[in-house]
Image: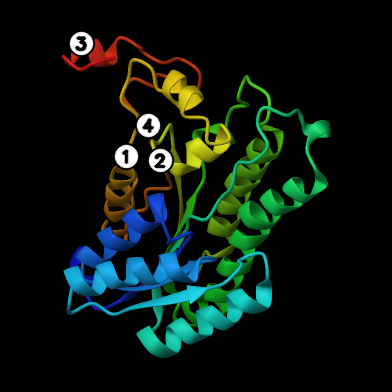
């Protein structure tokens, strides 16, 4: 499968930074043309420039859209197919976790709508468009939905009701879509990250670096590149093989809530 990735096209949402940026760069490194979707035009164009500079034979296009708006998503998908070719890989990476540590009823309705719109509707809109415009007519492709380990187990702290519900919904959507695409060579997969260093968790704690440092104390979280490696592994399996779901977590994260905070000291690193 890996050799067939070269020259084909991947579409990555939330591609302007962090995990999405890392996934886009990693797939470009496999020779794939990349359609980059996110809201920030400037950040997307910076990622596009990185790809073109590092991989001159690869084509990359930036589409600044709000994935909560179906018409914007559908237009971007159509443009990507016209400019880059049929979409072989879709990575639904865009996601938000906002409002912690407020309890559900304390959240502004605007934040609830924003998370639901991005984490659920955005994934469905993008998948709907890619399936209709590219994957289903040719009966092949790989869809990876970036879920979370929190999608299977409720976090024990405040502020996660909407995000947890969103990821649990994404798990159900992934499993159902896998069944509904029977009769094709389309693979529908879930990637479940654990704790990842970067803007996503920093945003979660309202950009409080002290709170972030406390959360990461004693162990090494994942880097965005770790998730990019996982995506490359999943998409490069032979067509007869599906990694239906892959949990990628720091070794020190023994379960959702159990962290080995002596990890760094055993590795000879500062806590």
Residue sitting at x 32%, y 39%: 223
Residue, disc 4:
249
Q: Is residue 267 left or right of residue 93?
A: left
Label 4 to label 2, Cα distance in Å?
14 Å
- As rendered, which of 231 and 211 lies closer to the eye? 211
Residue, disc 2:
198
Query: x%, y% of residue 268?
Result: 16, 14
Residue, disc 3:
266
Residue, disc 1:
223
Query: x%, y% of residue 118?
Result: 63, 56
Query: x%, y% of residue 265?
Result: 23, 10
Question: Which tag, 2 or 1, sits closer to the chain's start?
Answer: 2
Residue sitting at x 67%, y 78%: 71
Q: Are marks 3 and 1 in contact (CB under 8 Å)?
A: no
Residue sitting at x 18%, y 68%: 54
From this view, report whether residue 225 is shown above or below residue 258. below
User: Mark 1 or 4, which is nearer the eye?
Assistant: 1
């Amino acid at each position: 499968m890996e050799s067939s990735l070269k020259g084909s096209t991947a579409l990555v949402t939330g591609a302007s930074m962090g995990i999405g940026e890392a996934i886009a760069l990693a797939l470009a490194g496999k020779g794939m043309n990349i359609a980059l979707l996110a809201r920030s035009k400037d950040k997307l164009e910076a990622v596009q420039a990185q790809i073109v500079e590092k991989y001159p034979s690869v084509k990359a296009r930036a589409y600044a859209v709000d994935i909560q708006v179906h018409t914007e998503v559908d237009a971007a998908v159509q443009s990507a197919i016209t400019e880059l070719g049929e979409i072989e890989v879709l990575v639904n990476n865009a996601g938000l976790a906002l409002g912690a540590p407020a309890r559900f009823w304390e959240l502004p309705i605007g934040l609830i709508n924003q998370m639901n719109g991005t984490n659920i509707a955005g994934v469905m809109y993008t998948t709907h468009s890619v399936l209709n415009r590219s994957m289903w007519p040719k009966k092949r492709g790989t869809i990876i939905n970036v879920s979370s380990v929190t999608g299977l187990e409720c976090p024990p702290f405040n502020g996660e009701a909407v995000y947890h519900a969103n990821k649990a919904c994404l798990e159900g959507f992934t499993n159902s879509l896998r069944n509904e695409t029977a009769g094709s060579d389309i693979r529908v997969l879930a990637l479940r990250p654990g704790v990842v260093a970067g803007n996503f968790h920093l945003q979660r704690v309202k950009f409080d670096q002290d709170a972030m440092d406390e959360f990461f104390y004693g162990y090494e979280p994942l880097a965005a590149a770790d998730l990019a490696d996982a995506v490359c592994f999943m998409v490069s399996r032979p067509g007869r093989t599906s990694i239906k779901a892959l949990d990628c977590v720091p070794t020190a994260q023994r379960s959702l809530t159990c962290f080995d905070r002596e990890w760094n000291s055993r590795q000879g690193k500062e806590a």
